[in-house]
Image (cartoon, rainbow, N blue to C red):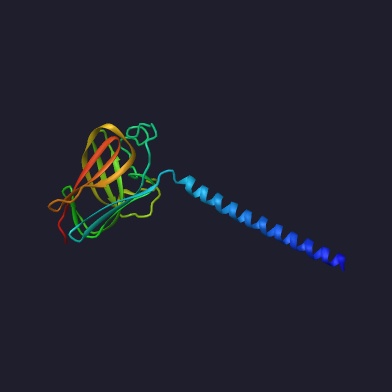
Amino acid sequence: MIQHTFIKTTLLVLSALLCTFLYSCTDQETDNQQQVQNGNRKSPIAIASVKYDGAYIKVVYGQPYRRGRTVFGDLEPWGEVWRTGANEATEITLTKTILMGDEAIRAGTYALFTIPEPDSFTVILNHELGQWGAFNYNPDRDYKRMKFPTNRLPIPVEAFTIDFTDPQQSMTAMILRWDFVQIDIPIRFYGE
């Protein structure tokens, strides 16, 4: 009888230890997966948006940081297609047709790429969504290409940022800033 009780108690203790061990392993594995996922995304996801008279524009992008580096002409070489952010290619969604610069842009979602140059950026709207970076960028899928001048900033911007100005009289501007560079992209809301 004593031996039977001893075996039962031992089995209960071993079961409890096994459960504790398995739980801690599962917990540790989840924590490691979380750290890997967070560790792979050094650049957080950011969203810029603007609304005007029933129209809505939203830009989703990865927000890289300068971290003391020279960005344009070095980290992002002149004349090469850039994902306009970090991680996945930046995407812009329009709920109504707009004018971007001089170009009419139909409602839809587009990948947003740019080609940096010292005095201007070529802005590219591309039909290929869900890309990682610009590694598989295909110019045959381009919807529109537009060129906008750059402005030199007196103080560098640490985190790449996309903003919209407050709409006034059906006009806004999408502003891209990073390092010492700013690009103002004029947008007019005019409906369908």
Give the left or right position of residue 128, taking residue 51 as reference: right
Q: Quadrant of the N terminus?
A: bottom right
Rendering quarter of residue 65: top left
Q: Which residue appears at 33% of the width and 32% of the height? A: 73
Report the residue at 74% width, 59% height from top: 14
Look at 34% across and 42% down and name the residue there.
Answer: 82
| Nearer to us in this view, 25 or 116 | 25
Q: Position of residue 168 (x, y in %)?
A: 14, 51
* Left or right side of 24 for 137: left
Compared with residue 179, is residue 103 higher up or lower down, i.e. above or below?
below
Foreground of the two, 10 or 38: 10
As displayed, is residue 2 above or below residue 77? below
In the image, 146 versus 88, the foreground residue is 88
Q: Position of residue 21 (x, y in %)?
A: 67, 55
**Is residue 74 left or right of 189 when viewed as pictured?**
right
Q: Is residue 190 left or right of residue 144?
A: left
* Quarter occupied by the C terminus: bottom left
Residue 117 position within the rendered picture, expressed as x and y whole percent measured from the top left: 27, 36
With respect to residue 60, does 19 lie above or below? Answer: below
